[in-house]
Amino acid sequence: MATTQAFLIETGDKRDGRGRRIATLERRAELVTDYRRSGLTMAAFARREGLRYSTFAGWVLKSVRPVRTPLAPVRFAQVRLPVAPAAGFPAGLEVRLVDGTVVRGNAANELAALVRALRS
């Protein structure tokens, strides 16, 4: 009966505790660029480079996602409403959005729901 032996050839790559190679971000980007130039399918390229398909597919997917910029924090301001409407000012509430949109209404909860709908 023939026995098969597996050998691990040391290439100097960093490895995790299970012996898997750890690729730097630069190496990942290089592999994705090489894949795009190769004309191969992702599966064929991953096989050729000795990578797990699912790992390599994740790298490719992350390379095409747009980088999200953090949203600005929401700012709140405490306001006091006049007891009686000022002359020339209609009774009710008014909200001015950052883009210049002005929303007016008498019911605060309905106005808040409208502003939320406009912002989403």
Image (cartoon, rainbow, N blue to C red):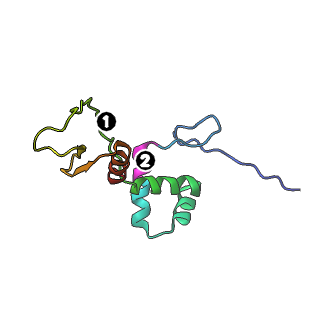
Q: What is the x, y in percent for residue 57?
A: 52, 57
Q: Considering the image in quadrants, where does the N terminus appear?
A: bottom right
Q: What is the x, y in percent for residue 39?
A: 44, 70
Q: CA distance from mark 1 to mark 2?
A: 35 Å
**Residue 51 is at least partly visible in this image:** no
Q: Is residue 90 magenta?
A: no
In the rendered view, would you say 10 is above or below 53? above
Q: Is residue 27 magenta?
A: yes
* Residue under numbered circle 2: 27
Q: Determine the residue positioned at 25% across, 44% down.
A: 92
3 and 94: which one is in front? 94
Circle 1 residues within 10 Å: few <14, some 14–19, many ≥20:
few
What secondary structure is the magenta-colored segment mainly?
helix
Q: What is the x, y in percent for residue 62?
A: 44, 52
User: What span is in magenta?
Assistant: 24-30
Q: Determine the residue positioned at 18% across, 50% down.
A: 100
* Residue under numbered circle 1: 73
Q: What is the x, y in percent for residue 72?
A: 29, 39
At numbered mark 2, what does the secondary structure look like: helix, strand or loop? Answer: helix
Residue 52 located left or right of residue 103: right
Q: Amino acid at mark 2?
A: Arg
Question: Which numbered disc, 1 or 2, marks the residue that appears first in the sequence?
Answer: 2
